[in-house]
Image (cartoon, rainbow, N blue to C red):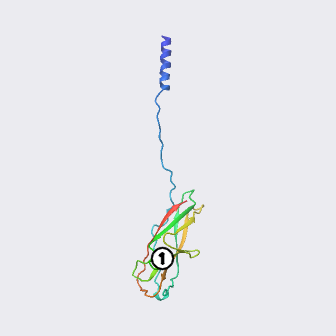
Amino acid sequence: MRHFILLLSLMSCSLTAFGLTANIKVHGVVIAAPCEVEKNNYLIDLKKINIWNIKDTQKSPWVDFSVKLKNCPVGTTKAVMKISGTPDSTVTEHFINNGTAKNVALNLANTGNKTTIKNGDTITANVNTQTRNVEIPLSARVSGYGSGMVAGSFKSHLEFTFTYQ
């Protein structure tokens, strides 16, 4: 009887040792969270512009503004901003005026060196490693071209799309 109990005990131990296998599948997606845009909408006031001050391809004074990003994740070192807008049909490196003024367009530029920014251009800016913020300084002005200018409202629409590195 003693051998039978011992044999039964050994058999029960070996049964648990030869049990079924379970598979565990783990999945997920690793992402780089984007920086946060400080403002989703910008309204740049170019003020009242005297038509006589921008006749014959002259331009209004620059109005400076910045597009700002905040809370960029650690590991994100650069923000790339792509500018999209409808080019003006006459001066294609400028953006169309959708207002009632005629023969004028939006001239967008980099604030630092006043290099013109046109549709499809990208600007790469470094993320500040201390603050985790980005600031992209821009300048805008109205550009007149040729005769036939007509006074009226000035409206232009641009969109900025961000990617990160």
Q: Is residue 123 visible?
A: yes
Q: Is residue 132 visible?
A: no
Residue 89: image quadrant is bottom left
Q: Which residue corresponds to the image point at 48% horizontal and 26% vertical from the top-left?
A: 18
Q: Which residue corresponds to the image point at 48% horizontal and 19% vertical from the top-left?
A: 11
Q: How far across and how far down the image is residue 136, in percent?
A: 54, 69
Query: Which quadrant: the C terminus?
Result: bottom right
Most extreme residue toward the top is 1
Residue 43: image quadrant is bottom left
Q: How far across and how far down the image is residue 19, in percent?
A: 47, 28
Most extreme residue toward the bottom is 52
Q: Image height check: is 33 above or below 11?
A: below
Tell me the element at label 1: loop
Q: How many marks?
A: 1
* 41 or 108: nearer the viewer: 108
Most extreme residue toward the left is 100
Residue position marked by numbered label 1 in the rendering: 92
User: At label 1, which amino acid type do we have?
Assistant: Thr
Q: Is residue 96 rendered to the left or right of residue 133?
A: left
Q: Residues within 10 Å of mark 1 (few under 14, many from 20)?
A: few
Q: Which residue corresponds to the image point at 47% horizontal and 32% vertical from the top-left?
A: 21
Q: How far across and how far down the image is residue 52, in percent?
A: 47, 89
Q: Which residue corresponds to the image point at 48% horizontal and 14% vertical from the top-left?
A: 5
Q: Image height check: is 28 above or below 81?
A: above
Q: How far across and how far down the image is residue 122, in percent?
A: 52, 67
